[in-house]
């Protein structure tokens, strides 16, 4: 992978969208990898006990997909200087083969003189946005004059 | 019971350090469905200028969550972790985390406020390497749902 050039990017550029299907299997895998064993991400019973409609995906799994969208476009994960999200709606993952489809898109919202760009990301599941204020600051390759 | 704003400014150093391993990074990248070579191939990572495979940008949540465990263990704070919902999260990367890193973390309580019967607890996990140099700053806003509160 090669880091994208700052000069090749303009404000308004769209990132290649990413669609990821999350089933219960993906949630279990993320729980193990991250160490987040909160049962609302694997137990129907406990999810309902705390007032959720069903098991929900880890917010940090959705955020991880945001980072994957951005690093895949930038060409180098080390280029991401900052990323942040607000978790506004849960991603509900029913126990069936379809699970939940998370759809991510991004757009360059600022092209800065210091060689960085600000990317604004939208994440949707079940026809609704699930994140607010999802942004990443990415340092791109700057050509020497 | 509302959290006491007097806790703002407290810091809790995490017990022990965290050894970043290649297989943990690979496992984390697999869980995100990310097949980038720099997460799994040391040679590819070195060709990109890193000492070893690097971690995805959200990997630091592992350290942040471990550091947050001390909050539930502080009886004076009285935090009921079963009522905690993740409100927002951000990472500032001073450099990428790579396999072989031995990381320390300190959790800082930056803010406590009450809104609509819920407590909003803002914490910051400062992650440093074995030389003490900053690696990642992870900020989390945790919503502690009040008794009968929203969400």
Image (cartoon, rainbow, N blue to C red):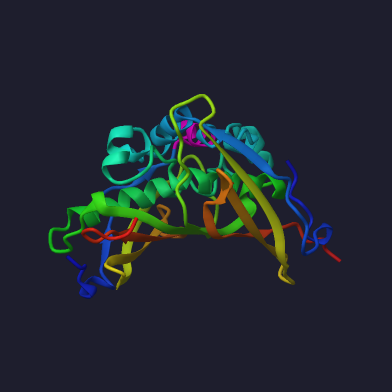
Quadrant including the N terminus of chain A: top right
Query: What residue lies at 60% left-to-right and 36% top-to-bottom?
Result: A20
Quadrant including the C terminus of chain A: bottom right
Q: Is residue B99 left or right of residue B113?
A: right
Residue furthest right in the image: A145
Confirm whether the magenta stretch covers residue A85.
no
Query: What residue lies at 39% left-to-right and 49% top-to-bottom?
Result: B103
Front position in the image: B75 or B151: B151
Residue A127 % position (x, y): 59, 46
A121, above or below A1, in the image: below
Q: Main secondary structure of the magenta part?
A: helix
Q: Is residue A18 left or right of residue B64?
A: right
Instruction: Give, as a single range, the part of the protein colored magenta.
Output: B21-29
Query: What residue lies at 39% left-to-right and 45% top-to-bottom?
Result: B62
Is residue B16 something that shows in the picture? Answer: yes
Is residue A38 something that shows in the picture? Answer: no
Residue B123 % position (x, y): 35, 63
Query: What residue lies at 50% left-to-right and 48% top-to-bottom?
Result: B58
Residue B118 % position (x, y): 29, 65
Residue furthest left in the image: B75
């Amino acid at each position: 992978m090669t880091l994208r050039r700052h000069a090749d990017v303009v404000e308004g550029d769209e990132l290649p969208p990413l669609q990821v299907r999350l089933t219960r299997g993906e949630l279990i895998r993320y729980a193990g990898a991250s160490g987040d064993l909160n049962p609302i991400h694997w137990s129907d019973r406990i999810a309902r006990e705390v007032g959720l409609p069903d098991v929900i995906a880890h917010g940090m799994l959705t955020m991880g997909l945001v980072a994957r969208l951005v690093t895949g476009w930038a060409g180098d994960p080390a280029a991401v200087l900052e990323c942040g999200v607000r978790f506004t709606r849960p991603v509900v993952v029913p126990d069936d083969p379809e699970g939940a489809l998370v759809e991510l898109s991004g757009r360059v919202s600022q092209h800065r003189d210091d060689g960085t760009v600000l990317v604004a990301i939208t994440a949707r599941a079940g026809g609704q946005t699930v994140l607010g204020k999802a942004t990443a600051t990415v340092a791109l390759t700057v050509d020497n004059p | 019971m509302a959290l006491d704003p007097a806790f703002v400014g407290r810091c809790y150093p995490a017990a022990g350090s965290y050894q970043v391993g290649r297989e943990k990074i690979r496992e984390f990248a697999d869980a995100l469905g990310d097949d980038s070579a720099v997460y799994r191939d040391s040679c590819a990572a070195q060709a990109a200028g890193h000492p070893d495979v690097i971690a995805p940008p959200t990997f630091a949540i592992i350290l942040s969550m471990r550091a947050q465990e001390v909050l539930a263990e502080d009886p004076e704070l009285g935090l009921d972790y079963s009522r905690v919902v993740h409100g927002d999260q951000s990472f500032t990367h001073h450099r990428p985390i790579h396999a072989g890193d031995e990381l320390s973390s300190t959790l800082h309580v930056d803010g406590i406020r009450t809104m609509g019967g819920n407590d909003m607890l803002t914490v910051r996990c400062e992650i440093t390497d074995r030389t003490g140099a900053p690696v990642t700053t992870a900020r989390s806003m945790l919503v502690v749902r009040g008794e009968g509160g929203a969400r």
